[in-house]
């Protein structure tokens, strides 16, 4: 759930933490037979598109892992770092750091060849204004 959600929730989400295995199962497996028949060049465009779809969530997780390493620099009272959302996941922040129950940092991680930083900052500011602790809705 969202980083601000109480730990007492029974809802759990499981995901593969081994990115190579997740890539193999999600991106390559659908094309395995074609690749084994020597049609790798024909499925390559679809695999490349799949890499981009796969890399986004992995990039966000790497971003949060980095923030965990820097937690004491963010705020010595940092207790949690994770994603946050509300409204059924329509407004999502890739990383929120909490010092106690107070948000002290918000951040976005984008996997793209080019981004509009001003637009991302403005959207992040809007989402951060809606950030609440302990009142999230399930998605």
Image (spheres, rainbow, N blue to C red):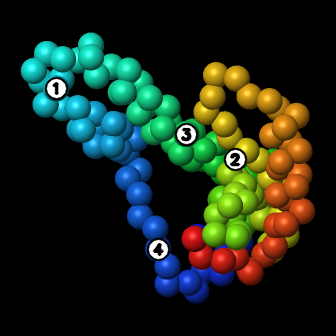
Residues under numbered marks 1 and 3 in contact, where contact means CB atoms less than 8 Å apart: no
Q: Residue 100's spot in the image, x, y percent?
A: 80, 72
Residues under numbered marks 2 and 4 in contact, where contact means CB atoms less than 8 Å apart: no
Residue drawn at point x = 82 percent, y = 49 percent: 124
Tag of residue 67: 2
- Eye-nearest disc, 4 or 1: 1
Tag of residue 56: 3
Q: Residue 114's spot in the image, x, y percent?
A: 70, 23
Instruction: Compare marks 4 and 3 and give the one earlier in the sequence.
Output: 4
Residue drawn at point x = 78 percent, y = 64 percent: 98
| Residue at the extreme left | 37
Viewer-closest of 33 and 8: 33
Residue drawn at point x = 41 percent, y = 57 percent: 15
Residues under numbered marks 4 and 1 in contact, where contact means CB atoms less than 8 Å apart: no
Q: Residue 106's spot in the image, x, y percent?
A: 80, 53
Rendered image quadrant of residue 76: bottom right
Q: Is residue 133 visible?
A: yes
Q: Is residue 69 visible?
A: no
Secondary structure found at label 4: loop
Alpha-carbon span between mark 2 and mark 4:
23 Å
Disc 1 target residue: 34
């Amino acid at each position: 759930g969202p980083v601000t959600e109480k730990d007492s929730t029974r809802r759990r989400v499981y995901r593969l933490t081994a990115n190579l295995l997740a890539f193999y199962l999600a991106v390559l497996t659908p094309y395995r037979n074609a690749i084994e028949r020597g049609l790798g060049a024909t499925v390559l465009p679809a695999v490349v598109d799949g890499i981009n779809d796969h890399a986004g969530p992995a990039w966000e997780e790497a971003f949060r892992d980095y923030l965990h390493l820097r937690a004491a620099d963010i705020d010595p009272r940092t207790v949690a770092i994770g994603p946050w959302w509300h409204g059924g996941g329509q407004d999502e922040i890739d990383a929120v750091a909490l010092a106690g129950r107070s948000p002290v940092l918000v951040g976005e991680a984008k996997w793209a060849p080019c981004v509009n930083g001003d637009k991302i900052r403005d959207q992040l500011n809007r989402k951060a204004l809606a950030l609440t602790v302990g009142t999230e809705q399930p998605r």
